[in-house]
Image (cartoon, rainbow, N blue to C red):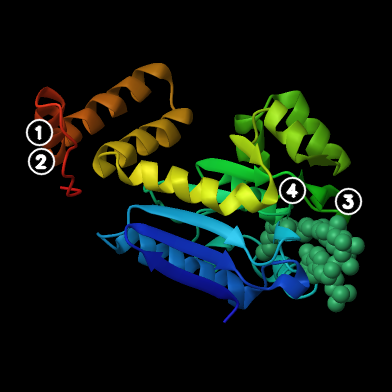
Amino acid sequence: MALLYEKRGRIACITIDRPRALNSLDPQTFKELSDALIDFRDDHDTWVAILTGSGNRAFCVGADIKDMLPMLNDIRNEWWRMPPTILRGLELWKPIIAAVNGHALGGGMELALACDLRIAAEHATFGAPEVTLGIIPGWGGTQRLPRAVPFAKAAEMIFFGQRIDAQEAYRIGLVNKVVPQEQLMPTVEEWAQKLCEMPPLAVRAAKEAMIRGTGMNLDDGLMLESRLMDVVVASEDHKEARDAWLEKRKPTLKGK
Ligand code: CO8
């Protein structure tokens, strides 16, 4: 097992656990990551996930260069052979927070980009070194990085394979917050807990509208928004949240 997967109340915590290889992803770890994400997606009782890496050197330094990169030739034109994850192939509308506890490089930065919120420890670094290996970011980096930060900044990071530190990542909007290392997990857990107090169907619908809408023209995006609003407006949680607001009390949410 190279991945730890545990649930605490409504929060699922996924930890890539290969610290000696800086939490790089080999085929086995990639499969375990896929299994954990699918379980999280399908579990009615878990509402938020935290994704992190073991130790304090790395969040994830991407594909295992020895064991994973050679697969690139085998899967050419057949990317569907890779287990589905949030990088590619798995639709998951529950919110995910990346706790970036060190290097987030290559596929590791792409993994953080596929999360919705990113909180970094002060010593974290971010980078896309793929071009220096003669390839391009292949787990969504060419698509998600320019959507997350200004195009010129994404181009600089991808063309030169240059690394940036956590403060620079914050400055360009790549991460939500930078905290001292010892504050990382408490801060991420606090954000996760706060998210669990939000009506989950509304959070999921908002995420779906934002992500699907990014690839649409405005008219189609507005249509999608109305369709998702029709769904949440009929939910029990919406009625409960509205009643709770009127009665000045906390809502009791069910995810229904
Ligand atoms: N894969 C495998 N092992 C790694 C990796 C990696 N990506 N990165 C580091 N390691 C291993 C090292 O080999 C070393 O192991 P050992 O002690 O047995 O020699 C150990 O981790 C520690 O690494 P270093 O000694 O290099 O530690 P430093 O602190 O000196 O440097 C760095 C840390 C800067 C993170 C450095 O290790 C580094 O640059 N690593 C490479 C990072 C990289 O290039 N990542 C991109 C990989 S390509 C990718 O992610 C493409 C995604 C899409 C692919 C789709 C595939 C199907």
Give the CA distance from mark 4 to mark 1: 42 Å
Give the CA distance from mark 1 to mark 3: 54 Å
Horizontal side of 102 relative to 77 (left or right) equals right
Which mark is drawn over residue 132?
3
Query: Which image quarter is the N terminus in?
Result: bottom right
Quick check: is the Cβ at mark 3 less than 8 Å away from ligand 1? yes
Q: Label 4: which residue? A: 124
| Disc nearer the start of the sequence (1/3) | 3
| Disc nearer the start of the sequence (4/2) | 4
Give the CA distance from mark 4 to mark 2: 41 Å
Give the residue displayed 9% in from the left and 27% down from the top: 247
Give the percent coordinates (x, y) of residue 162: 86, 41
Q: Residues within 10 Å of mark 4 (few under 14, many from 20)?
A: many
The amino acid at mark 3 is Thr
* Eye-nearest disc, 4 or 2: 4
* Eye-nearest disc, 1 or 3: 1
Q: Label 2: which residue? A: 236
The amino acid at mark 1 is Lys
Q: Residues within 10 Å of mark 2 (few under 14, many from 20)?
A: some
Q: Secondary structure at mark 2?
A: helix
